[in-house]
Image (tube, grey):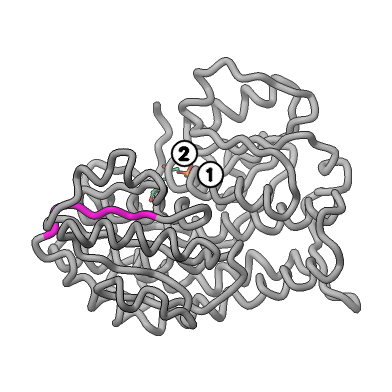
Amino acid sequence: EKGGFEHFMLKEIHEQPKALTDTLRARIKNEGKKAINLEEIGFDASWAEANRVVITACGTAWHAGVIGKYAFEHFARIPVDVDIASEYRYRNPIYNPKDIFIIISQSGETADTLAAMRMAKKSGARIIAITNVVGSTLAREADLVMYTWAGPEIAVASTKAFTTQLMCLYLIAIQFGVLRGTLNDAELGAAVEALENIPAEAEKILSDKENIQRFAYLQTNKTKVFYMGRLFDYAVSLESALKLKEISYTHSEAFAAGELKHGPIALVDESTLLVAICTQDNLFDKMDSNIKEVKARGASTLVITWDDVSYFDKTADEVFRIPRTMASLSPMLAVIPAQLYAYYVSILKGLDPDKPRNLAKSVTVE
Ligand code: F6R
């Protein structure tokens, strides 16, 4: 059942290239020029009349939503609000008849997420569901469903559901851009081609996993791990820190790198490991000085960056490289080393990554 892997989590991490391909394949058309086809799910031009997109979810799915916000801004130039479902449902949100909601849930059964979805629906807004479970409550109640064809996710820590949620969000964001006229044919073609290359690039990262396994040693004597990045890398930091705390019980947190000076730096000492995610080339110099500030206080440092970047070689203790793609698509790749890192630290500590204490796969009660 684990397909030769020691744990479901490792198996599911390895299933990402196939899951990403399956999620993408049916939604691409190639009639002379490459384009996105979301007619299958009923996403027509009327959806693009929205004035605002509101994304709501919990946990890892919320992290996908944060990336979705950056993606929608980038590709479709549309305002986006992202909310944690348990916050959203107790707020007094302002509705606009032209809002559309994107509700993300692997299981499609998370209580807070469903409650937020029902509130939005009651307001008259239209709902897009991104879910992995066919026929789930979320899938049944939404106006439009986009499935993440990831297959069953057994491990408590979400991996392939996350990257396929991202793939769905990117497809919608890019198609939104096409319908709203913010992307021209050449930009669309380049984006689709980049999406099509993601599965093979993910595979390449997996084939380099011994390198990540080697970095688990960085955890020795470290009681806290910080993840930081800017823009898309900040969102990936959130997800990376969650993975590590869930399955290795390491105190980990994530922050936007620019926030370092506004608080987190007070915690930095020799017992700190800093993982800096650096895929936004125009911000490398900012990241580099942030990393130096942390290093100067005795922390160990690991950088995740592109395979053609040597910028951080002198600054960081270790550098892990991922295949280059468009900077705006980096999360689907940059998160994979962080998933593997969390897995190997869990193993190093003698824990069972598939069954983390105190956590349930599906949170159907508040
Ligand atoms: C993290 C994790 C949780 C879920 C969250 C939402 O690895 O699995 O944070 O992402 O409970 O679950 P779904 O997506 O089923 O609504």
Mark 2 burial class by Cα count in 10 Å: few <14, some 14-19, many 20+: many
Q: Residue at x 21, y 42 (%)?
A: 266
Residue 53 higher or lower than 33, as above or below: above
Could you tell whether 22 is left or right of 243 in the image?
A: right
Could you tell whether 249 is left or right of 87 in the image?
A: left
Mark 1 burial class by Cα count in 10 Å: few <14, some 14-19, many 20+: many
- Of residue 137 and residue 194, the one placed in the foreground of this image is 194
Residue 58 higher or lower than 67, as above or below: above
Residue 256 higher or lower than 352, as above or below: above
Residue at the right extreme of this rendering: 32
Asked if residue 245 can be seen in this view, the reply is yes
Q: Amino acid at mark 1?
A: Ser
- Residue 289 at x, y percent in the picture: 36, 60
Q: For mark 2, give the secondary structure.
A: loop
Q: Residue at x 64, y 42 (%)?
A: 139
- Residue 132 at x, y percent in the picture: 56, 52
Say whether mark 1 is within 8 Å of ligand 1: yes
Q: Which residue is mark 1?
A: 105
Q: Residue at x 80, y 29 (%)?
A: 98
Q: Amino acid at mark 2?
A: Cys
Extent of the magenta region: 222-228
Residue at the top extreme of this rendering: 92
Asked if residue 40 can be seen in this view, the reply is no
Disc on res. 58 = 2
Q: For mark 1, give the secondary structure.
A: strand
Say whether mark 2 is within 8 Å of ligand 1: yes
Total marks drawn?
2
The quadrant in which the N terminus is found is: bottom left
